[in-house]
Image (tube, rainbow, N blue to C red):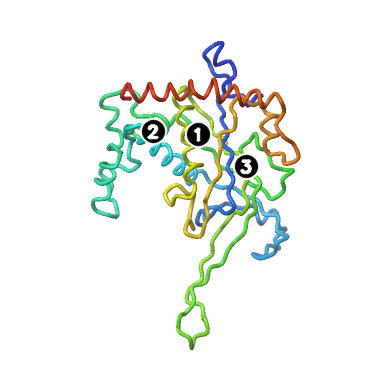
Amino acid sequence: MTTNALAGIESSGTIAQNDVYIRIRTELLVIGDSIITDRHHASNNNYEDDDPQNQIGGIIPSFTLSGWLRHGMESVLQQHDTTACHPGEANANFKRDGVYERDLEAGYHEKGTCLDSTENGCLVFDLFGGFEDRPGKFMRRPIQFSPVWSTVDYTHGQAEGHYRRLNRNVVSRNVADNRQPLRNAELDAVANLDGSWQLTFRELKPEFIGLLAETIEYLDTHQTEFSHQLGGARNFGAGIVDCELINPLYEERELKRVFDRGKNATAAMEKKDTRWLEDCRPKFVRALETRITEGS
Ligand SMILES: [Zn+2]
C-alpha cells in the first residue's frame, strides 16, 4: 500500500489513495477525562499516578481534534469572504441567549441552509455532513499514542506521547488553613506529543485538499490564539499545536522518515516538496477559490 494520496492525479485525474496525514506536535495536551489509556494492560496492575516509569499508551479520541480542524476551516472560509455552516442546530437550546445570532453575523449561516441554493452545500457541510442524514466526506481517526517510539506506526495515524494523570488542588486562601485543599481535580494529559493524524477521505475533491492545506497552515500560524488551541487548559499553555500537512506525494517509507530524528529528508523527498509547493498545492488552492467564487 502506498500513502501517496495524490498519485496519478495529474495523469488520470483520479486519486489512488485517500489518506492524508497531518503532523501534530504539542508539548501538552489536555482533553478532559476523555483520553483512553491502556494502563491496566501496560502496568501489570501496578499503576501509580506519579511513577515516571509507567509505560502508558492510549487513544486520543478525535472529537476534540475534529472540532479544532473544523474551527480552523471555518476561519479560512471566512477569510475568503464566505460563510460556513454553524456547528449547532438552529433550534437547539443554546446556553447563552444571543450567541447563536451573533455567530451568524460573524461569518456563519444556519446549519444546512446552504443546501437551499447548492446541491452539496458549503464546504464545511460537504466535508462534515451531519444534516439530513448525510455522512461527512472524510473520517477523522483517533490518534493512538505510545511512549515507546519504536512501536509507533505513523502510517496508521499514531504518535509518540507520554500520558500522565495530573492533580490540581484548589487550596484555601485563609492563612490559618495552611493551604488546606478545598477541592482536588484530576486531569488526563499527554505530554510531548509528536505524531501523525490520519484523515481518510470517502470522496476526494481537489477543493477539499486546498482547504485542508490552507487550514493547517492557518492553525499553525495562529497556534497561540485561545480560540485555535486544542483541548482544555489553554490558559496554562496546553494545546499549542505545531501542525503541518505531510506532503501527500510522499510514499509510506518517506512518511516514516519525517518522524525519524536521526534522518533528514532524502533528495527525492526534497524534489517532491518542491513539486508539491510549486505545482500541486496552488492547483488545489485554486480549486478551493473557484468553488468559493461559484457560491457553493
Ligand atoms: Zn453550510
Query: Label 2 belongs to which residue?
Result: 124
Q: Position of residue 150 (x, y in %)?
A: 74, 43
The one nearer the camera, 184 or 177, is 177
- Identified by mark 2, the residue type is Val
Which quadrant would residue 110 be assigned to in this image?
top left
Q: Position of residue 267 (x, y in %)?
A: 71, 25
- Identified by mark 1, the residue type is Met
Ligand 1: does it lie within 8 Å of the C-beta at label 2?
Answer: yes
User: Vertical placement of 80 versus 230: above or below?
Assistant: above
The one nearer the camera, 145 or 68, is 68
User: In terms of sequence position, does the residue under pointer 2 or pointer 1 come before the other?
Assistant: 2
Q: Residues within 10 Å of mark 1 (few under 14, many from 20)?
A: some
Between the C-alphas of marks 2 and 1, the distance is 14 Å
Q: Nearer the viewer, mark 2 or mark 1?
A: 2
User: Vertical placement of 216 versus 288: above or below?
Assistant: below
Q: Residues within 10 Å of mark 2 (few under 14, many from 20)?
A: many
Confirm or deny contact between disc 2 and disc 3 (CB under 8 A). Answer: no
Image quarter where the C terminus lies is top left
Q: Position of residue 261 (x, y in %)?
A: 72, 41
In percent of the image, x 48 and y 56: which residue is there? 234
User: Vertical placement of 158 versus 285: above or below?
Assistant: below
Residue that sits furthest to the top in the current view: 11
Confirm or deny contact between disc 3 and disc 1 (CB under 8 A). Answer: no
Q: Position of residue 291 (x, y in %)?
A: 37, 23
Decide if residue 109 is on the left or right side of residue 70.
left
Which quadrant would residue 126 be assigned to in this image?
top left
- Identified by mark 3, the residue type is Gly
Ligand 1: does it lie within 8 Å of the C-beta at label 1?
Answer: no
Q: SS for tag 2?
A: helix
Residue 195: give its label: 3
Query: Label 1 belongs to which residue?
Result: 139
